[in-house]
Amino acid sequence: MRKIYLLFLFTTSVYQLNAQQIAPLTVEKIMRDPKWMGVSPSNIQWDVNSRDVYFNWNPESAERDATFMINIANKNPVKVSDQTRNRLNRRQVIYSSDRSKILFERNGDLLIQNLKDGKEKILTQTVERESNPAFSADGNKVFFQRGDNLFSIDTKGGELVQLTNFSRSRKRPESKLSVQDEWLKQDQLRDFEIIKKEEKEKKLDADERKLFESKRPKEVYLDERSFINNIRISPDENFITWRIGKQPEFSKTTIVPNYVTGSGYTEDIQTRSKVGNPLTTYQNYIYDQKRDSVYSIETGSIPGIKDLPDYVKDYPKQLEERTKKNENREVAITGPFWNADGRQAVVVVVSLDNKDRWIMKLDQLSGKLTLLDRQRDEAWIGGPGIGGAFGGGNVGFTDANTFYFQSEASGYSHIYLVNVLSGTKKQLTSGKYEIQSLNLSRDKRTFYFTANMQHPGITHYYKMPVSGGTPLQLTGMKGGNEVSLSPDEKWLAIRHSTSNKPWELYIQENKAGAKATKITSSTSKEFDSYSWREPEMINFKNRFGDDVHARLYRPSNADANKPAVVFVHGAGYLQNVHYWWSQYFREYMFHNFLADNGYTVLDIDYTGSSGYGRDHRTGIYRHMGGKDLTDQVDGVKLLVDKYNVNPKNVGLYGGSYGGFITLMAMFTTPDVFAAGAGLRSVTDWAHYNHGYTSNILNEPFNDEIAYKKSSPIYFADGLKGNLLMAHGMVDENVHFQDIVRLSQRLIELKKDNWELAVYPVEDHGFVEPSSWTDEYKRIFKLFEESLKK
């Protein structure tokens, strides 16, 4: 009996050991619920005491992540109670000027916490949500938005005051009297004393009401197509500003049918409109409380407000018509951003065609603007920290008269200062790297920022005096460093990863060269049982002489057919060639699986990717499927010339923008790629959204040339190799209609070397492991059958 029991123990332990071994890799193993890998810490936040760090984590692979806490003195993670989790539900924390208390929103209500004793005080407890809170300069009042209006509340006495009166119900004006009726009215006044007396009493009553009634804010009417946002009050409380958006009278939106529903009926999902549809327009206003006067911020005199983009030169008739109209371009204003005493104000203005961004000084008394900086880009304004129509980017005052901002004027996003009195500008950072995040210290003497100075794919955290100088590197671990600075600015909470190890949490003193202490170990034993490749980081010159960076996965034992696969990342403006853990973690594991099966894999940060400056970012302007595709083709040439790949056995795949490139490759360079898998692909850019597409291709009715050059559906006749297309049927980003239209085109062209896999319950980003598994088994089958012969 004892021998049987020992044998049972032995076989059980062997089984458990095997269960923790993932090799050999399979698609089924890779595409399981990602919890099998272990769950990395996320949502890092410091407590206001600067001693405790809270984060979401799931070391036990539970149904949901829990909240954990560590203290910098005792760095052992501890799961916190539900009560503590609720206490942490603060949205954004705002400090009073003396940093004695904090203001925050919790579940739609406003609270203040005294930092000395930790006690919380509820300011509002209403059905409506109070949002966008801010302290007054002296800390005795809190400003907040409720519905469409701005309010203030006294932090001691609780006095509530409505500061704006935006109304959607206007009183109907009295009908204008005809000449005859006006004559009768005056005749009655002349003939009857009783009527004279009644009119006099009405006037006296009205005057008495004005004398004794409380002062009310001026009523501003909003019609049914208008909405209000960006409500702000100046530090001196003299001025209230806001932005009114007016939606177009008619802008058709698209519908995505949902077939798998709880009701059993097909249900329609209302989604976005398409590029080129009429846009919302914006107007900003100022309310001078002392003068009880409302007036607009004037944009008609902005330098270059009438400038036409260069591309219209390709359309002589359009150029003539638009020149003759001489219209001001529509703009969106963010701000104002005030200095501490409210005497200086700056706004960020962006043209809705996104060719211009202006930093402008605002005269609050008149609404007039004065130019401080203009950045013009004939492609489109963009880059890290630059902002757009819905945000001003990284901006603010360092002192009473100095304003900071980021700009790509040098070709890379860098930090600039401008004196709002003299207009003098100063560039603080320079070089072939990007400032990717930017924060100002509490005392406004230091900038903290993340940048990729050493290599496009390595980020570090730096500090630098606001006056400029040599940046001091604070982090030391190679890879990716996402840093959260403690409120007292003495500690760094760092989420760090490498190309083959997921994110973990570290704590480090805010000192150069300080040791970073590892807090979490998140990966599972099964994940750790495999020797995940550290991709080779290579670069090559494309046909235009530009540097292109790539990740390379080489097989230990190459297949006799010497096949290769090129992976095309999505989003267009995204970086995947870096030394940190990829957001494409499933694809990363799939590339290890492909290499195990004899494939060479190349993953390129093609033209249009982020992390490489303005020229790389805008290199696809007016021609998507141009330089971004030739980079893939040049990458294949590198594989053939240097890495012994068979040019007849090369495939590619990618999702979203990567799916689009896959289609363009299969249709326009069919002799380069023998097989391709296009996932959730854009097939016709005229059917995508406005915000993204109009930046790169302008609008279909204004720049038809760009759309015809860039849309795969116009090149489908070129298909030669084997094509797999896969698409979620409830994709609210790239609609299922896209792939249906292309399928019909392929049918009409009598192409028979393609197939379409549909996923009834999937949106743009797949969720269900079964969908991921099915999709990637099909991709692998495509490559096995097409590239190994």
Image (cartoon, grey):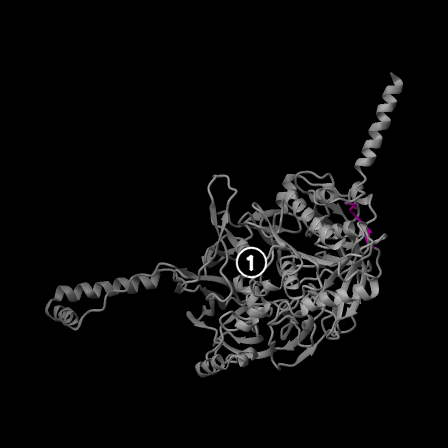
Decide whether residue 284 is among the magenta residues: no
Question: Which quarter of the rendering shows the N terminus?
Answer: top right
Specify start and end residues of the magenta stretch as a single range: 516-522
Is residue 769 visible in the rendered structure shown here? yes
Decide whether residue 519 is among the magenta residues: yes
Is the magenta region chiefly helix, strand or loop?
loop
- In the visual, does 603 lie left or right of 239? right
Question: Which quarter of the rendering shows the C terminus?
Answer: bottom right
Tag 1 secondary structure: helix
Is residue 336 visible in the rendered structure shown here? no
> Residue extending furthest left?
191
| Quarter-of-image position of residue 189 | bottom left
Q: Position of residue 723 (x, y in %)?
A: 65, 56
In the depicted structure, whether residue 639 falls above or below residue 301: above
Q: In the depicted view, which residue is nearer to us: 621 or 281?
A: 621
- In the visual, does 309 lie left or right of 215? right
Q: In the depicted view, which residue is nearer to us: 601 or 547?
A: 601
Q: Position of residue 522 (x, y in %)?
A: 77, 45
Amino acid type for the residue under numbered disc 1: Leu
In the depicted structure, whether residue 670 falls above or below residue 45: below
Q: Residue at x 64, y 58 (%)?
A: 659
Q: In the depicted view, which residue is nearer to us: 632 or 257?
A: 632
Q: Position of residue 89 (x, y in %)?
A: 61, 47
Q: Position of residue 471 (x, y in %)?
A: 78, 69
Query: Which residue in the structure is indicated by mark 1?
Result: 742
